[in-house]
Image: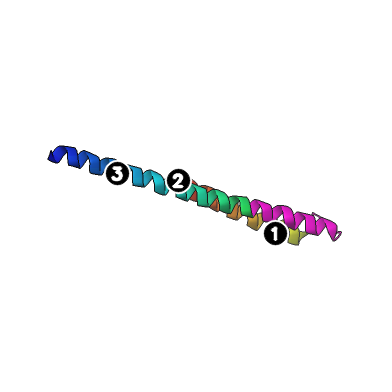
Amino acid sequence: MREKCTLIARDIGKEKEKEKEKEKERCTTTTKRRIEMLRKIMIQVFVQNGSDMRNPEVLRLSQLLDEQLNFYDRCLRY
């Protein structure tokens, strides 16, 4: 009886762990999608305003967004 209860408790623990992983993945995916959307909007605004996409400021902002995406990718893996 005790062994059966222990097995049930382990199963419950594993299910909770899986739920936490799914929630973490969902949050990371949502954040990643928002960063990508922000980049697209930023590029559209710069183009509409006649800015050169090779402008150092545009490149710097794009690089910062890349760093954020890479950060969330690493978080998802670990």
Image quadrant occupied by the N terminus = top left
Image location (x, y in percent) of residue 27: 51, 52
Pick whichever of labels 1 and 3 is earlier in the sequence: 3
Callout 1 touching callout 3 (CB < 8 Å): no
Q: Which residue is mark 3?
A: 12
Residue range (magenta): 35-54
- The amino acid beneath tag 3 is Ile
Residue, x 40% and y 46% (percent of image)? Answer: 19
* 3 w.r.t. 32: above or below: above
- The amino acid beneath tag 2 is Lys
Decide if residue 31 is in sight here.
Answer: yes
Q: Which residue is mark 2?
A: 22
Residue, x 66% and y 55% (percent of image)? Answer: 63
Image location (x, y in percent) of residue 44: 78, 55
Residue, x 68% and y 56% (percent of image)? Answer: 38
In front: label 2 or label 3: 3
Res 31 → quadrant: bottom right
Kindly report the distance in space between the C-alpha atoms of the residues bearing marks 2 and 1.
33 Å
